Every structure is written in C-alpha cells, then in structure tokens.
Image (tube, rainbow, N blue to C red):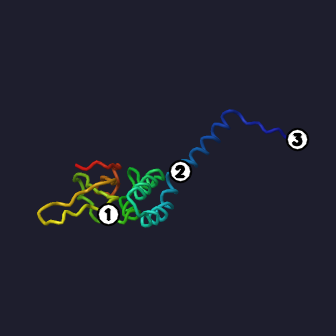
C-alpha cells in the first residue's frame, strides 16, 4: 500500500491553481454568457425598479464593469453608444440608460423632465467603459 504524501508546498500550489481557475471562469467567461439573459430580462422589465434590478444584476455578474466594451451595454440595454465613440485622444464620452421615460412638458418652449433611476457611464475612444454608476439624482 502506497502512502500519499503532500507537503505544505504542494497543497499551496494546488490551492493557487484552483483559485486562478475559479477567478478566470468568473471574470472571463461568465459575463459573455450572461448578456443574452440580461438583455431578455431588460426587454421583459415593465417598471423602473425591474429595469434597475437588471442593471444591478449586470454589474454583479461582471457584464457592466470597467474595461468592458460599451457594445455590451448596447446589447443588454438596447442603446447605440458603441457607434458614438469619441475620437482618439479626446475626453471620455458619457452615456445614460434611463429606467423611467422622460416626462413630456407638452410645450415646445419647455424641456422635458427626467425622474427616476438611471445608469450613467463614461467610455473611451477604444469603446471601453471607464466609469459607471446608478443614481436617481437629476441635476
């Protein structure tokens, strides 16, 4: 009968490999598989809070994250920001996904108002998200 002996170094290496594999599967593969599910959930959402919940889910799943493509935001939320990338070397471009439709003023002389939750983000000329946040504060 053979006795298996693992030194502390072997166990440490094994744990390191497992943590690397887990980290790459969570960060690398999962977000792309989630895009279709999140897009379907966003299209099915009927209320502002349901839409906000989908955006939180997208952030938690790593779909909306720093250095992810703005095209992913377009795929989930039905926007077209990937086509509006700023020129190389210029400042970041802003994008907003409102979860509540604007309040129509009913007049050509007054602007429409915005209320409710929204996802705001900035992306660079490479189309990569650099900053994002959820808010219900309108200025």
Q: Residues within 10 Å of mark 1 (few under 14, many from 20)?
A: many
Tag 1–tag 2 contact (CB < 8 Å): no
Q: Residues within 10 Å of mark 3 (few under 14, many from 20)?
A: few
Along the line of sight, the residue nearer the viewer: 59 or 24: 59
Q: Quadrant of residue 76?
A: bottom left
Q: Quadrant of residue 2?
A: top right
Toward the right, the furthest residue is 1
Residue 16 appears at what percent x and percent y?
A: 60, 41
Q: For numbered disc 3, what is the local secondary structure? A: loop
Tell us which disc is closer to us: 2 or 3: 2
Identify residue for label 3: 1
Tell us which disc is closer to us: 1 or 3: 1
Residue 46 appears at what percent x and percent y?
A: 41, 64
Identify residue for label 2: 24
Identify residue for label 1: 82
| Quadrant of image for the N terminus | top right
User: In screen coordinates, is 14 left or right of 57?
Assistant: right
Q: CA distance from mark 1 to mark 2?
A: 26 Å
Toward the top, the furthest residue is 8
Q: CA distance from mark 2 to mark 3?
A: 38 Å
Residue 112 appears at what percent x and percent y?
A: 20, 61
Q: Earlier in the sequence, mark 1 or mark 2?
A: 2
Q: For numbered disc 1, what is the local secondary structure? A: helix
Q: Earlier in the sequence, mark 1 or mark 3?
A: 3
Q: Residue at x 49, y 63 (%)?
A: 37
The image shows residue 32, relative to residue 20, as above or below, that is below
Mark identifier at residue 64: none
Q: CA distance from mark 1 to mark 3?
A: 63 Å
Q: Quadrant of residue 82?
A: bottom left
Q: Residue at x 53, y 50 (%)?
A: 24
Toward the front, the furthest residue is 106
């Amino acid at each position: 009968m053979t006795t298996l002996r693992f030194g502390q170094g072997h166990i440490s290496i094994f744990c390191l490999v497992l943590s690397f594999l887990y980290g790459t599967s969570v960060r690398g593969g999962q977000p792309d598989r989630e895009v279709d599910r999140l897009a379907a959930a966003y299209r099915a959402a009927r209320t502002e809070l349901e839409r906000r919940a989908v955006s939180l889910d997208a952030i938690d799943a790593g779909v909306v994250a720093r250095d992810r493509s703005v095209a992913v935001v377009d795929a989930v939320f039905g926007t077209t920001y990937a086509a509006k990338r700023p020129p190389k070397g210029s400042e970041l471009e802003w994008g907003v996904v409102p979860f509540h439709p604007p309040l129509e003023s009913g007049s050509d002389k007054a602007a429409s108002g915005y209320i409710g939750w929204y996802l705001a983000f900035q992306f660079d000329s490479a189309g990569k998200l650099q900053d994002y946040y959820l808010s219900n504060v309108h200025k």
